[in-house]
Image: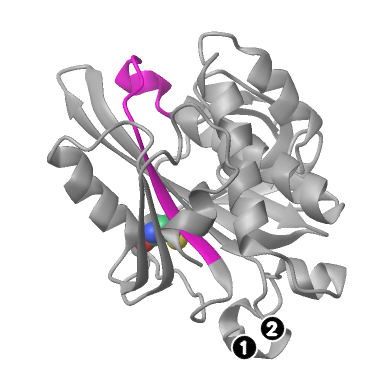
């Protein structure tokens, strides 16, 4: 994969006009945060074949053998308030799902708060990080890791039962470049109409969470109930088994299981 291959035939207006590609780096999110702080253009994409310090949510490591995955971070400068930052995660998740469906025809779904699953196994994760000033957002780095051609045997034991890749699910190798290009087109079309909340219906239609029993694990407690809805700020409404309706935000959630 090279920057030129990613840009060739991409046909976007903003996203991926600038691409910084690394064979190996620390974390594409860290590089993108640094570039954004130095004034990099909106839409700049940082991509790597491997990361030495790939990060997931909650300070977990992001596993990805070299050359098997999409490891990418986009710099965005949306005119939104801090409370709306989850919109970026939601449109990214929907866009990854559509891109996977278009390229592989696999039944990808979004899983709250920020995963993409196939047959209930995690295929992609999103990590958005923002620099804020007072209540406004200076920039957002939205990083996504997608298990594209990761062989089954290489997943570490602790995630072997809960993770999968596109090649495992489809039985064939998938072009990382074509998939990445399609993701950029999908994100751009939604990003350019971020004011329009139609992405919420898309999210609900593609959801592996709404209408299901969920178990939400916090560092020292667990909530279980029926997932009812999601709002424009990415909060999930659940009906607890006690009958009480609660609005859940994704901060400090360790894990979400669906039954
Ligand atoms: C999660 O599911 O916990 C989020 C995972 C996000 C991983 C991606 S890989 C590219 C980018 N760089 C990072 O260090 N993390 C994100």
**Which residue does the image show at 58% across and 75% down from the upper left?**
68
**Which residue does the image show at 20% across and 46% down from the upper left?**
35
Camera-side residue of 79 and 175: 175
Ligand 1 near label 2 (Cβ, under 8 Å)? no
Residue 220: x percent and y percent?
42, 56
Q: Is residue 193 left or right of residue 74?
A: right
Q: Quadrant of residue 184?
A: top right
In this rendering, is residue 93 above or below 165? Answer: above
Q: Quadrant of residue 149?
A: bottom right
Residue 3: x percent and y percent?
43, 57
For the residues labelled 2 and 1, the Cα–Cα distance comes to 6 Å
Q: Which residue is mark 1?
A: 154
Q: Which residue is mark 2?
A: 151
Residue 140: x percent and y percent?
32, 34
SS type, badge 2: loop
Q: Residue furthest top?
A: 196
The answer to the question of whether label 2 and label 1 lie on touching residues, with beta carbons closer than 8 A, is yes
**Which residue does the image show at 72% across and 34% down from the upper left?**
227
Q: Is residue 235 visible?
A: no
Residue span colored magenta: 70-85
Camera-side residue of 60 and 139: 139
């Amino acid at each position: 994969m090279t920057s030129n291959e990613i840009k060739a035939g991409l046909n976007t207006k903003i996203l991926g006009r600038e691409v910084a590609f690394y064979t190996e780096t620390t974390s594409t999110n860290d590089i993108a945060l640094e570039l954004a702080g130095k004034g990099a253009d909106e839409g700049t994409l940082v991509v790597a074949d491997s990361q030495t310090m790939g990060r997931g949510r909650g300070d977990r490591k992001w596993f990805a053998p070299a050359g098997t995955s999409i490891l990418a971070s986009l710099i965005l400068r949306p005119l939104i308030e801090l409370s709306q930052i989850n919109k970026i995660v939601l449109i990214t998740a929907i866009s990854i799902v559509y891109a996977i469906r278009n390229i592989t025809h696999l039944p990808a779904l979004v899983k709250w708060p920020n995963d993409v699953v196939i047959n209930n196994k995690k295929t992609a994760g999103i990590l958005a990080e923002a620099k804020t000033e007072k209540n406004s957002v200076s920039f957002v780095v939205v990083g996504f890791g997608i298990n594209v051609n990761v062989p089954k045997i290489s997943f570490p034991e602790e995630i072997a039962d809960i993770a999968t890749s596109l090649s495992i699910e489809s039985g064939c190798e998938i072009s990382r470049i074509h998939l990445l290009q399609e993701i950029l087109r999908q994100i751009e079309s939604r990003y350019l109409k971020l004011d329009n909340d139609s992405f919420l219906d898309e999210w609900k239609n593609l959801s592996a969470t709404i209408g299901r029993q969920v178990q939400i694990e916090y560092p020292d407690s667990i909530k279980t109930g029926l997932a009812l809805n999601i709002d424009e700020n990415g909060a999930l409404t659940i009906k607890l088994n006690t009958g009480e309706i609660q609005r859940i935000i994704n901060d400090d959630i360790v894990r979400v299981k669906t039954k």
